[in-house]
Amino acid sequence: MAVRGNIWLAGLIALTALLVLANLVTDATLDVKYGWDIRVNCAAVEAHADGLDPYFVRNLKGTRLSYPYLPVTLDVFRPVCAGSFVVDHYRGIYLVLAVLCGLMLPGLARSRASARDVGLKVLCAVGAFVGFEWVAASGNFAILNGIATAIALNLLLRPPTPDAWDDESFSLRVVGAALLGLVTSFKLVFCPVLAALYFLPLPRARKLTLIAAAAFSFALPILISRLFYPDLFSSWQLAISGRIPGQHTVDLVETNPSLLLLARSFMEHMGLGDSKPLMFAIDALAVLALLLVPFALSVLRAVGSEPARAGGSLLARLDRWLIDHPRTAMRVTVLAMFALYLSSPRLKEYAFFELALYAAILVVDLPVLALAAFLAVALLAPAVISMTGHAIEGTFTLLIVSLTCFWILLLDFRARSGRNKLKASIHDKSR
């Protein structure tokens, strides 16, 4: 039966890979002018080099879209936009970078990754939630986020050491936390992801040090932009707040498949008006009910399943449990990142590429049925929808798909916790 299961799963993985590849090929052969985001970004870099204010769309050549990123990024992106090579050939370059993301992602199940594990991570990076398809179509610099995220996670999720205090790789974890902070500063709405670092299997002081390093790196580009680019920083504030008339504005309620926009659609359907406080309240309730509360209860259930140990608050018990179960703690950390990322009020289609990277770490050691369900929901269904020409943009398809995948991963975590509780109970009785 195990052999049959392996053959069946291998066939499903092969079918998924073929559909993902076919979807990318189909997308590349459509007669559509792609790459609007990379053209906007490089037009902004060029305008800045020419002494123009890139936050005014009239100064950007060949586009009506605005540049939304901090002023410091204009110099950071200059090497990428030098010449026209990247702009002309970005699709092939992005595909190589997406594969590299999958290859660089850490593994949690084994000390040494198998070819199957690596293949699954690359497949998820390229195909899950069709996030990469949107990155490749738009030419969004989320691909750079993906590379930095993969490196940061590789540094943060180092193999556990027997003694949590004697962690020789802690300096590398600090670098990883700082890099993750820089990543979130690129798209400011994803900064809550940094809070997930608390679930790492380290003493509390070290976890708080990592969070502080990440928070400092998040704030650093903002401080640099304000101090060294004061005029551009003022223009950036005007642009993102929609106070430059007659041009495209990046807004939280801009069309995107987030729970915030789902809350607004619910309000419109129920005739509740357009009250923003009510919209944010409904969004908060949805985030808590669908993501954060189930996650927190699952973790507390796992902590409570351990034999009682004397003394300490609930937070102290959580810290001890994380250190005693380092690999499980790292899974919890990535699952928390997944949930917090998915909670974002502005979740554009290309952002699902980064969500796919978090998922890729967690799917590798899923049991057969859970892995099959994840592949069907996260990769097969979106690829088929996209290939058949049905609209994904402007709908909540990707949100529903990713929420379903979160629950697949969460239920697997709960099942593992239940099995560990049963083993502990049997062990205690045998003693």
Image (spheres, rainbow, N blue to C red):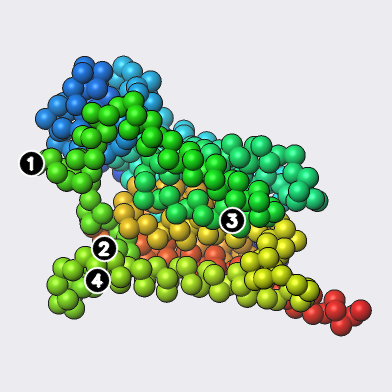
Which residue in the structure is indicated by mark 3?
198
Among numbered discs 4 and 2, the one appearing first in the sequence: 2
Q: How far is the residue under mark 2 from the one under mark 1?
A: 24 Å
Q: Residue drawn at (52%, 43%), measured in percent from left and top?
A: 214
Mark nearest the camera among 3 and 1 is 3
Which residue in the structure is indicated by mark 2?
261
Which residue in the structure is indicated by mark 4?
278
**Which sits in the foreground, 144 or 253?**
253
Among numbered discs 2 and 1, the one appearing first in the sequence: 1
Among numbered discs 3 and 1, the one appearing first in the sequence: 3
Q: Amino acid at mark 1?
A: Gly
Which residue in the structure is indicated by mark 1?
246
Q: Secondary structure at mark 2?
A: helix
Q: How far is the residue under mark 1 from the one under mark 4?
A: 28 Å
Q: Amino acid at mark 4?
A: Leu
Q: How far is the residue under mark 3 from the one under mark 1?
A: 44 Å
Q: How far is the residue under mark 4 from the one under mark 2?
A: 12 Å
Q: How far is the residue under mark 4 from the one under mark 3?
A: 31 Å
Residue at the far bottom in the pictured view:
429
Q: Assess whether mark 1 and mark 3 are in contact (beta carbons under 8 angstroms).
A: no
Q: Determine the image quadrant of residue 321.
A: bottom right
Q: Assess whether mark 4 and mark 1 are in contact (beta carbons under 8 angstroms).
A: no
Q: Residue drawn at (30%, 27%), measured in percent from left and top?
A: 229
| Image quarter (top left, top right, bottom left or bottom right) of the C terminus | bottom right
Q: Secondary structure at mark 4?
A: helix
Residue at the far left in the pictured view:
246
Mark 2 is surrounded, within 10 Å at the Cα level, by few (under 14), some (14 to 19) or many (20 or more) other residues, namely: many
